[in-house]
């Protein structure tokens, strides 16, 4: 049940959501860089986790980030209407190879950043309808970040099964990297 007494309305600052979206973008990029060192056989090997293999799991993550962004953008024009399925990522395109996936993902990340930056603060807490449920935009953004974290963890497990060291994509690691980068610039 969404919106019960345990789930009160609360304003969420844009800065917090931008931090989380930036973290998702960074962490996704770290996982993609680690997977770029793998052979075609390794990214496609059925490891019986998540979406069978690394490429399948990465495709799932990409499509989720793509489709949720489409739904959020669509909600600005009609928050009570479901998005036209023709606007979602075409199912036939799920055969993207690793190189194409990396290339396409950059545009999706940019779209997430631009959306959260441009969204009026008051609109963050407004509900919209997606997949038959009503949810405030800020909670959906949180969901997408959390969803990506789940699947990055699965990819890290698959990398370990292949005898590879996965990157650290912990939020604290992101904060350390951002702090170090800011210090280098100053």
Image (cartoon, rainbow, N blue to C red):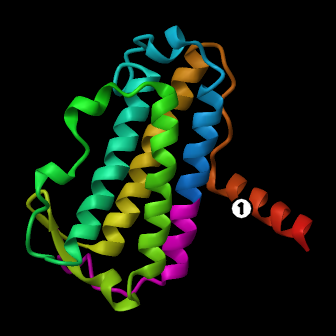
Instruction: Give the residue number, with chain letter if any, for mark 1.
Output: 175
Is 87 drawn above or below residue 63 in the view shown? below
Residue bounds of the magenta highlight: 1-22
Residue 127's image quarter? bottom left
Name the residue located 49 percent from the left edge and 27 percent from the top edge: 98
Q: Where is residue 82 in the image (x, y as percent from the top left)?
A: 10, 63
Identify the residue shown where x is 39% and y is 42%.
Answer: 62
Residue 6 among magenta residues: yes
Q: In which quarter of the image is the N terminus?
A: bottom left
Residue at horizontal 50 percent and vertical 8 percent from the top: 41
Asked whether 141 or 1 is in front, the reply is 141
Q: Is residue 1 shown to the viewer in this render?
A: no
Locate residue 142, reporting x and y percent. Answer: 40, 64
Instruction: Judge left or right: residue 85 versus residue 10.
Output: left
Tell me what residue is drawn at x 41 percent, y 20 percent: 53
Could one spot residue 162 in this view of the protein?
yes
User: Dot 1 surroundings within 10 Å: few (below 14), some, or many (20 or more)?
Assistant: few
Pick the front one: 152 or 85:
85
Instruction: Measuring from the top left, give residue 144's x and y in whole percent.
Output: 38, 56
Q: How many labels does the image show?
A: 1
115 magenta-colored: no
Residue 126 vertical position relative to residue 109 in the rendered view, above or below: below
Q: Quadrant of the image for the C terminus? A: bottom right
């Amino acid at each position: 049940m969404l919106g019960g007494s345990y789930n009160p309305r609360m304003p969420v600052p844009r800065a917090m959501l931008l931090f989380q979206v930036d973290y998702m973008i960074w962490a996704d990029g770290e996982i993609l860089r680690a997977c770029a060192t793998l052979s075609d056989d390794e990214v496609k090997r059925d490891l019986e986790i998540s979406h069978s293999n690394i490429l399948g799991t990465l495709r799932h993550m990409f499509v989720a980030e793509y489709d949720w962004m489409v739904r959020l953008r669509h909600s600005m024009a009609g928050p009570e209407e479901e998005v036209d399925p023709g606007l979602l990522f075409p199912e036939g395109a799920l055969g993207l190879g690793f190189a194409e996936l990396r290339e396409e993902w950059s545009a999706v990340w940019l779209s997430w950043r631009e959306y959260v930056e441009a969204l009026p603060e008051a609109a963050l807490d407004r509900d919209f309808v997606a997949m038959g449920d009503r949810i405030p935009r800020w909670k959906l953004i949180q969901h997408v970040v959390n969803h990506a974290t789940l699947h990055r963890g699965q990819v890290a497990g698959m990398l370990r099964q292949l005898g590879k060291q996965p990157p650290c994509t912990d939020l604290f690691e992101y904060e350390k990297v951002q702090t170090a980068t800011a210090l280098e610039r100053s």
